[in-house]
Amino acid sequence: MRQSAAVGVRAGSERRDATIHHYRESFMKGKFLVPLVLLIPSLSAVAGQCETNFVKKGNMITGTEYFTSVQVSGLSAASAIGQVRNAGIARNMVVLDEDLNAGTLVLEEPSTAMSRPLPLQVTADNSGTVTASLKLRKASVGHTEEIKKGICEMIGSLKPGKTAPSRAAAPKPLPTVIDAPRLAREIEAQAKENAAVVADRYKGRMYTVKGSNAGVSDGKNGRYYVTFQATTSLIPGMAGSDRELFATRVRCLLQPNQKAYALTLRANDRIQLTGTFDEYNDTDFVVELKDCVGVK
């Protein structure tokens, strides 16, 4: 009986060791990856939180506001801000402000002919809570479902993580084609609301500007400036008035290889120049572009 008991104990021990060995091999071969993945919140679950928590407040008179939030276990503030930042860059949004340590981010979609830029504010903390808010200007109307979809596509794809991802490279933008007077009015109007934000809002934006030549002047280090007329006229040179003295103009600093182009321009010529926003000078009423080249 003692021998049989000893054999039974030995056999049981061998089966236990074999079982442990089997599970260890299965784990190493990835057979238990599916249960582990289930511990990570799915994208649809996070997006569902965003949609469920989405709230609209206010009205056209006071300004409509939109809020939402998500909770992602194992997500740090830095990782959350980095992920949302990269999602915004992928959508060609402008990063106006970013602080990984404080967990704050301000993104903005470029203005279009139909809309003015609106800042999206995002905050995050180390508990994994991420909030997003967007406020419309007074008397503005927004499409709630489109706004919800846009925001939730960005924060609804958040994944757990402790460190911020590397900054994504922005897609190379195509120049925005625009008339000089319209670009001048657009920037001037936004500067009246908040001049401090103009530099960050337009930094790096490329434009192909159309209009009439108001004059060519010597610039820095042998480079030349071309200034556009402040108003558009079907008959070049006939749109002048005393009010133009105080109208904002667009001025382009040409690339060094554009000297021949500059010397052949005449007053009132219809021109197109492609350049990058440099600065807005509200003292001289000038929107300045740099590295400009003539477009034929």
Image (cartoon, rainbow, N blue to C red):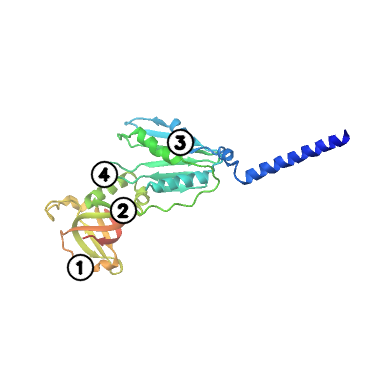
User: Of the residues shown, which amino acid type is indicated by label 4?
Assistant: Ala
- Which residue carries the number 1 mark? 263
Which mark sits nearer the N-terminus, 2 or 1? 2
Which mark sits nearer the N-terminus, 2 or 3? 3
Which mark sits nearer the N-terminus, 2 or 4? 4
Q: Is residue 63 visible?
A: no
User: Of the residues shown, which amino acid type is indicated by label 3?
Assistant: Ala
**C-alpha separation, residue under disc 3 versus residue under disc 1:** 58 Å
Residue 27: x and y, percent? Answer: 63, 43
Q: Are marks 2 and 3 in contact (CB under 8 Å)?
A: no
- Which residue carries the number 3 mark? 47
Q: Is residue 34 visible?
A: yes
Q: Nearer the viewer, residue 256 or 7?
A: 7
Quarter of the image with the N terminus in it: top right
Quarter of the image with the C terminus in it: bottom left
Q: Which mark is residue 174?
A: 2
The residue tagged with tag 2: helix, strand or loop? loop
To which quarter of the image does residue 127 belong?
Answer: top right
Q: Nearer the viewer, mark 2 or mark 4?
A: 2
Residue at the location (45% across, 40% down)? 155
- The mark total stands at 4
- Which residue carries the number 4 mark? 113
User: Of the residues shown, which amino acid type is indicated by label 2?
Assistant: Leu
